[in-house]
């Protein structure tokens, strides 16, 4: 392997991008019919945080445009997975919360995802997975 910093950077990001593409492909195949990764991500975030968020806050969290988040939220609302209400303090804003149906959809997705991701970690080895976490977290923080 070359000691050239550009080559190292290209190799690192090529591996990350390739892994991301393969992971997204595999996740898309196991998610419940009609659910997209973006839908699962928003449902998972709302369930995990268990607080209402504005569409703008969600767009910022996921590093997407407000228009892209509005599109995702419209699909989730149509499916009955979220509740959208006016902000009582500022009628121009809306607030989003996960619905009971959204919690069920998230759980269904998790039950389909869990075997796949558990196998990946088992095949990699718990020690290697644990060792990768601080590096991936630091990289994510630098990119933010």
Image (cartoon, grey):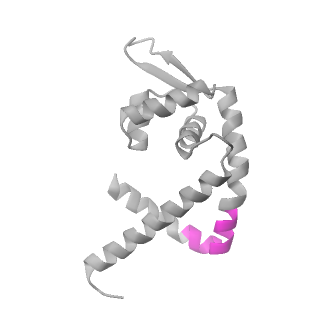
Q: Quadrant of residue 32?
A: top right
Residue 92 to residue 18: above or below: above
The answer to whether residue 40 is left or right of residue 105 is left
Residue 120 to residue 142: above or below: below
The answer to whether residue 31 is left or right of residue 7 is right
Of 75 and 5, nearer the camera is: 75
Of 136 and 103, nearer the camera is: 103
Coordinates of residue 121 in the picture (x, y in percent): 64, 67
Q: Quadrant of residue 8?
A: bottom left
Q: Quadrant of residue 35?
A: top right
Residue 22 to residue 41: above or below: below
User: In the image, is residue 127 part of the stretch drawn in magenta?
Assistant: yes
Coordinates of residue 140 in the picture (x, y in percent): 40, 57
Of 131 and 143, nearer the camera is: 143
What's drawn in magenta, residue-wise? 118-130
The answer to whether residue 95 is left or right of residue 93 is right
Q: Main secondary structure of the magenta part?
A: helix
Q: Is residue 51 visible?
A: no
The answer to whether residue 3 is left or right of residue 11 is left
Residue 78 to residue 4: above or below: above
* Quadrant of the snapshot with the N terminus: bottom left
Of 53 and 84, nearer the camera is: 84
Residue at image x 71%, y 34%?
104
User: In the image, is residue 144 part of the stretch drawn in magenta?
Assistant: no
Count of numbered badges drawn on the protein: 0
Coordinates of residue 138 in the picture (x, y in percent): 40, 61
Q: Is residue 105 visible?
A: yes
Residue at image x 32%, y 73%?
9
């Amino acid at each position: 392997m070359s000691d050239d910093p550009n080559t190292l950077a290209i190799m690192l990001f090529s591996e990350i991008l390739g892994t991301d593409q393969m992971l997204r492909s595999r996740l898309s195949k196991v998610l419940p019919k009609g659910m997209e990764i973006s839908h699962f991500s928003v449902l998972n975030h709302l369930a995990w945080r268990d607080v209402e968020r504005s569409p703008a806050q969600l767009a910022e969290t996921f590093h997407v445009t407000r228009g892209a988040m509005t599109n995702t939220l419209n699909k989730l609302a149509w499916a009955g997975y979220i509740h959208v209400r006016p902000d009582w303090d500022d009628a121009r804003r809306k607030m989003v919360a996960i619905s009971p149906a959204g919690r069920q959809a998230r759980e269904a997705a998790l039950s389909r995802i869990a075997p796949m991701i558990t196998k990946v970690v088992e095949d990699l080895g718990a020690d290697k997975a644990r060792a990768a976490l601080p590096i991936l977290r630091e990289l994510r923080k630098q990119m933010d």
